[in-house]
Structure formats: C-alpha cells, structure tokens
Image (tube, rainbow, N blue to C red):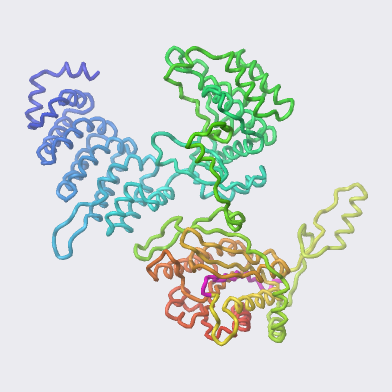
C-alpha cells in the first residue's frame, strides 16, 4: 500500500513538502518519500501540515538528525492510536526537555512513544505519562546551591528506554508509584538513581513487583505451603523467580534439592485465577516428585526425550486427577488446544505440535477420537494406567513406540512449530534425566552442596516485611526477611527450680492475682474441643452409639469469664547484649529475664488469660529470627518450660519487623484488649545499618501501625540510658527498670498493673 501511495504523490508535491521541512540532513532524503506516503494515509490535511511544522522544528533544534528521523517515521502510527491533537502536548514536552540540560533524552523519548501509545491509547492517559516524565526530569536534575545552573538527570533517558516495558507490567498508577519511590529515595544519589530506573537494583525490582497486577507468589506462600502439606504431604520450599526481566526466553517452573521454583506472578488466564494456576503447577510438580523416577538420557535423541517427557507429564497428570478429580477442569483450561491441521509439515517440523495434540487428548477420559491414530495411542496409554500407576520406564517405551510409528521426514526441518505447544503449568523436566557422562556444566549442577544448618531446616519459608525509611518518608517494600520457628527445648526441671527459688514472691503474687481474677466464671458446654469432658453429654452420646444412632461429637466443655478479656504477647529481645552481667547481681541479664518471664507465664496461667511468648534477634535485614516459646493455645506445661529453659542470646535487635510479625497472631485473638509487651535491654540496631536513627524510626512506625490495629504496645526497658530513645518509639508507654536484679518481681507486677 505504501508503494502505491508513494507513486501517487507527485514530484512537485514531494518537493513542496521538502521545502516546507527545510532540512539538509542526508539521512532524511532516504526515508522522506515513504514517511510522507504513510503520513498522507494516516493524517488529515491539517494534521499533515502540523506534522511538517513540528518536524521542521526538530530538524533545526540542533540535536542532530536522530530526533527528526524518529519523529518522521513514528508519528503517523502514534497519531492513529491517540489522535492528531496529541501532537501539541507531545511537542510541548519536547520543548521543555530541550530547554533543560536533558536534551539527549529527546531521542529515547520519541523512540519509546509509539510503544507507550499502544499501552496508553487515550489523550488523557498519554498526558498523565508526559506529566510524570516531566516531573521526573524536574526532580532529578540537580542544581548547585546559590547558582542557577542545572545538570542532566541521571535517570530520564533510562526511564524512557524502560517505559514501554514498565507499562506492560504496571498500570499507569503503578508506574507513578514506582517513579515516585525512585524520586523520593534516590534523587541525591546519581549512581543509585541510574540503577533504580534501569531496573538493575533489587529495590527497583521489589517496588515493581509490589505494583504489578496479578497474583503474587509471595502474597500466597503460606496458603500454597498448606496446600502442599495437606494434599501432597510435601514440605518443599517455594522459591519465586522473576518473569519480568527475561525478554528472550521465559523460564519454566522446576524443582531441585533446594526447593520448587515458580514464577513470581500469575495473571488470570482462560478463566483460571492466579492462585489456581499456582495450585495446578504445584500439583503437577508434586505428582512428578511422588511418581516419576529418573532415567538415563545418554542413548536418547532430543526428539525421543521430548516424546518421553510428553507422555510422562500426561501420566503424572492422569494420576493426580485420579486422586483429586477437581484438577481436571484446571488442567484442561490451562492446556493449549492446538488444531490438528494448524502446522504445515511442508515448511515446519510438526513434532512438538503433534505431541501437544496427543497430550491434550490424553487428559480426557479414554474415548474414541476423530483422529484414529491419536485414538489408538490414547487407548494404549489408558490401558497402561489401568494396570496400576505404571512407571516412567513404561512411558519411555510407549513414547519410543509412538515416535517410531508417527515420525515424518519433515521432523528434521530447522523451523519448528511452537504456536499453542507450551503447557506452562508443567515444569521443565530436568529432574527426569540422569547422565552417564557428565559435561562440566552438569558436574557443577550435580555437585554436592553443603547441608543446611539444623535451624534452617526447621524454619518456615521467610515472611517479608517493609521497613520505614525516615529520610525519604517512605516504606522499603519487602525489605526484611523474617524466619520463624519453634525455640529449641531444654530441661523443663530448670524452670521448676527457678519457680521454687522465688516461692515467697509467688505467694505474694498469688494474693494479688486473686483480686484480679473475675468471679463470674461461665461454663461452655457442647464443645468439640474443650478443657474437660462433659460427663452428661458423653454418657448420652455413648447410649446413642450403642443404640445405633449418630452420637453427638460435642462431648467437651470449657470455661470462660465475661469480666476479663485480655490477650497478651510477650516479645523478648534476645540480642547478644543479654549475655552481659547484670549490675548488682551475679547473674546475666538473660538469666534474670528467664526468671521474670517464667514468673509472668505462671501468673498469667493463674488468671486464665491467653498468653503468647516469643523472642527475636537479627543478623542483617536478610535474617531476622522469630522464635516461638509459647503459643496462645498452649497451656503452661513442660513443653513451654523446656523452651524457656533453653533460651539463648545472640546477634542484633531489628525490632520493627518483630513487632509487625507479633501483631499478626495477636490481632486475631477474640479479646477486648490486646497487649503487646516488649522486654528489651537496648535500642534497635543491626550490623548492616549505620544510621542509628533508622531502626528507631522504623520501630516507632511499627508501633503506630499496631495502634491502628487496636493493639496496645508497652515497653519494659532494662537500659539505664533508655530515656534518650525509648520515648521516641513508645511515647509514654514504657517503664525503665534501673535495678535489673528486681526484674523477676517487677515484671509480673507491671503486667497486673497494666491489665487491672
């Protein structure tokens, strides 16, 4: 069409336009006729006149031929997307950029504009993008104090280069949030700014993932962990990989000795939500882990391996659907449905296409297909499964037989048909193969890795929490990794000895506790789970059972009170400083804390209030450890005492993440008052933080968050110099205990005063 239009333009008209452009760049002469042909097809006469006027400006702007060439080639298609009226706003932005020290960014701006217009096809959306670009230019072009001179923005051109890619992942609001974060945090750091806006920094990618659409793996790790445990009895760690930064080839799910690797985000597809797509991928991988056996690959060709993988994938899917029939709907929706005649064997290798057609047919219940050849192999496949679970070796034999009888000469062609052949919920099958002769790469892949430490094995996958940066007044998303686990156990008799040591104090506390105990005790009957057996209901259920009737399972009862409703979490700072000698005592601060916590737990048990105890310490933001000593559902018994007896101190004090994590379980308690007690001996600090105010301000922000959740936070500080910082975090809700030796007496009394 362009050829005919070009021929339709007379030489006089073309010369007239060339004179209007008034440009002497030799490169323009090579493309001018074709560009004007396209412009005539896309633009109105007025739009064509404006097109040449603005092109003339770009040619005389003094920035070389590149901006003009890009504009001539790209603007007609952009105008078709957003309309000719957008030209004035675009050129207004170009003029502002040209007047600034950022004129070199004009070419990347114009180069990206066509792709941006496809994502933002309305004038209003494009205007928002232009406003955002100019805001970035204004905020990141640095000035010398006292001198009206600016320097180029380190990030503006990089932003234009990434803008089309960013808009494929983010909404316009998400893009604004991503840009705002970079401006606030890095406008004074050119190198960090360049790393952020080029998507090279971890912070940039973390904010991008936070603003992305779809179902994020990190938001549903716990639910998927429970899915794996409950349905597949599999406790593998889920590890996300990014799909946003691999342009050439998207990686596939896989698993190895270190965990199951899944995409970091899934969008809804074919009516299947992101969470169900994750469940489908985990079901397929778990089926492989349960039923597949590795086989040696040395004697198989690539085509044979492809066929074996196809039938083995279908086998484990069929076994998974046999166990959980609801998977069939999800698998069928996510599996591509290629048309049998779509691939032309005269031009392409159709092996992948034929295997995908067969794979989809194998997902269906055994039935005759229109294609008799496929129908025969479907029947043979299901006949093999009907004899039991079958095996990987049987599938290999069946695959080789299929390949031998269906191979075509065109399967050797270099061009392979890929359309509708990718089953993206399936893994890459690297686990399926073993090699007699290892290459160097395979030797390194199979190399023995050091076994993880015992505490790493027992830990759950990390939770990620934000951290407040007071300098930029913004949260760093997913900045802290928190690992939680049960505290190791020791000798419960040691805690009994501590309680006996403080027997006189316990008696005095007992008298105070009797005054706090609510007298209106209520009995809750007909409970499936309770503190004691309800004999009347139990006898009645036994009679019903012997009479052949369905017995009532609610044979327990429990007690509660309607005069006191308080749930408490005691959060212990277990940092290295607790190993220091306590002033005026022969014991360490840790030992005194151990005695105080034991007395408090005993006292709360007497009151009947729900109580949870946990400790924390940190080794940089990548490793905050949260150790459970007592859960709300646990009673004061030997298991809890054994954990308290084994308390140890080490590392640093990153308090904000621990406060946020403690609130997760406390806020779910059905209590009128929720109290978070923090026992610490120093200010928040960590070895990867140089600014002493940073973690103090983060803890302060965490306390504000807990206030909004209805959680009352109170600090018991053992640092004599705590007045310098503790009020900044907790306001007036703190007590400084100067005489640490009296901690076992003062902690229970303080709790009773707070909950009176």
Residue pictured at 56% horizontal, 87% vertical: 584
Q: Is residue 168 above or below residue 41?
A: below
Residue 746, horizontal then vertical, whole percent: 60, 83
Q: Quadrant of the C terminus?
A: bottom right
Return the residue nearer the eye: 628 or 339.
628
Q: Is residue 41 above or below residue 291?
A: above
| Residue 681 visible somewhere in the drawing | yes
Q: Is residue 452 above or below residue 431?
A: below
Return the residue nearer the eye: 4 or 147.
147
Magenta region: 561-577
Residue 357, horizontal then vertical, whole percent: 55, 21
Q: Quadrant of the N terminus?
A: top left
Q: Is residue 572 magenta?
A: yes
Q: How many marks?
A: 0
Quadrant in the picture for residue 296: top right
**Left-right relation of 7 to 394:** left
Residue pictured at 39% horizontal, 44% vertical: 170
| Residue 756 visible somewhere in the drawing | no
Residue 347, horizontal then vertical, whole percent: 42, 14
Quadrant in the picture for residue 16: top left
Residue 687, horizontal then vertical, whole percent: 44, 66
Residue pictured at 22% horizontal, 34% vertical: 84
Q: Is residue 703 magenta?
A: no
Residue pictured at 49% horizontal, 12% vertical: 409
**Left-right relation of 187 to 640:** left
Q: Is residue 395 above or below residue 748?
A: above
Return the residue nearer the eye: 118 or 204.
204
**Left-right relation of 666 to 727:** right
């Amino acid at each position: 069409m362009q050829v005919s239009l070009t021929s339709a333009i007379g030489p006089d008209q073309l010369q007239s336009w060339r004179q209007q452009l008034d440009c002497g760049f030799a490169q323009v002469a090579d493309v001018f006729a074709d560009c004007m042909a396209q412009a005539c097809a896309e633009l109105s006469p007025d739009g064509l006149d404006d097109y040449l006027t603005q092109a003339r400006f770009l040619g005389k702007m003094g920035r070389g031929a590149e901006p003009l060439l890009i504009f001539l080639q790209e603007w007609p298609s952009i105008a078709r997307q957003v309309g000719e009226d957008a030209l004035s706003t675009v050129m207004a932005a170009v003029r502002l950029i040209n007047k600034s020290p950022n004129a070199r960014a004009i070419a990347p701006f114009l180069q990206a504009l066509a792709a941006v217009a496809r994502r933002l096809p309305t004038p209003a959306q494009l205007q928002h993008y232009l406003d955002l670009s100019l805001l970035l230019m204004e905020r990141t072009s640095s000035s010398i104090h006292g001198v009206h001179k600016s320097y180029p923005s380190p990030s503006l051109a990089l932003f234009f280069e990434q803008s089309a890619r960013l808009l494929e992942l983010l909404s316009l609001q998400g893009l604004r949030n991503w840009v705002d974060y970079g401006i606030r945090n890095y406008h004074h750091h050119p190198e960090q700014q360049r790393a952020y806006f080029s998507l090279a920094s971890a912070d940039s990618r973390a904010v991008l993932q936070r603003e992305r659409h779809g179902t994020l793996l990190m938001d549903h790790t716990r639910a998927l962990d429970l899915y794996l445990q409950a349905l597949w009895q599999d406790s593998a760690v889920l590890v996300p990989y990014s799909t946003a930064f691999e342009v050439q080839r998207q990686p596939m799910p896989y698993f190895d000795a270190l965990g199951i690797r899944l995409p970091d985000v899934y969008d809804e597809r074919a009516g299947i939500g992101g969470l169900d797509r994750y469940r489908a991928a985990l079901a397929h991988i778990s089926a492989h882990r349960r039923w597949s056996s590795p086989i040696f690959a040395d004697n198989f060709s690539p085509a044979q391996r492809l066929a074996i993988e196809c039938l083995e994938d279908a086998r484990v899917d069929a076994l998974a659907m046999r166990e959980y029939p609801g998977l069939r709907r999800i698998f069928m929706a996510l599996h591509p449905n290629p048309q049998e005649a779509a691939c032309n064997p005269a031009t392409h290798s159709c092996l992948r296409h034929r295997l995908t057609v067969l794979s989809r047919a194998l997902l269906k219940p055994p039935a005759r297909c229109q294609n008799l050849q496929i129908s025969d192999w479907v029947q043979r496949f299901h006949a093999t499964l009907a004899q039991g679970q079958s095996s990987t070796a049987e599938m290999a034999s069946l695959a080789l037989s299929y390949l031998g009888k269906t191979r075509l000469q065109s399967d050797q062609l270099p061009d392979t048909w890929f359309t509708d052949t990718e089953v993206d919920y399936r893994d890459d099958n690297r686990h399926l193969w073993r090699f007699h002769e290892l290459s160097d790469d395979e030797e390194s892949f199979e190399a023995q890795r050091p076994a993880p430490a015992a505490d790493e094995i027992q830990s759950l996958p990390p939770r990620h929490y934000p951290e407040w940066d007071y300098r930029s007044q913004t949260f760093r998303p997913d900045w802290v990794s928190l690992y939680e686990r049960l505290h190791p156990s020791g000798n419960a008799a040691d805690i009994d000895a501590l309680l006996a040591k403080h027997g006189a104090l316990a008696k005095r506390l007992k008298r105070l506790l009797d005054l706090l105990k609510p007298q209106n005790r209520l009995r809750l009957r007909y409970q499936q789970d309770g503190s004691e057996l309800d004999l009347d209901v139990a006898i009645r259920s036994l009679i019903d059972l012997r009479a052949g009737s369905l017995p009532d399972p609610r044979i327990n009862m429990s007690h509660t009170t309607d005069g006191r409703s308080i749930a408490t979490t005691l959060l212990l700072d277990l940092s290295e400083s607790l190993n220091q000698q306590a002033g005026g005592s022969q014991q360490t601060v840790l030992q005194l804390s151990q005695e105080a916590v034991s007395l408090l737990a005993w006292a709360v048990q007497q009151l009947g209030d729900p109580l949870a105890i946990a400790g924390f310490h940190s080794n940089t933001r990548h490793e905050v450890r949260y150790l459970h000593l007592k859960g709300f559902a646990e009673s004061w018994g030997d298991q809890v005492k054994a954990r308290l007896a084994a308390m140890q101190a080490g590392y640093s004090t990153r308090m904000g993440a621990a406060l946020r994590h403690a609130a997760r379980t406390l806020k779910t308690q059905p209590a009128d008052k929720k109290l978070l007690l923090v026992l610490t001996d120093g200010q928040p600090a960590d070895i990867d933080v140089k600014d002493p105010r940073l973690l103090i301000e983060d803890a302060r922000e965490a306390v504000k968050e807990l206030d909004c959740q209805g959680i009352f936070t109170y600090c018991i500080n053992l640092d004599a110099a705590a007045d310098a910082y503790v009020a900044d975090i907790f306001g007036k809700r703190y007590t400084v205990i100067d005489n640490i030796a009296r901690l076992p007496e003062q902690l229970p009394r303080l709790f009773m005063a707070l909950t009176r």
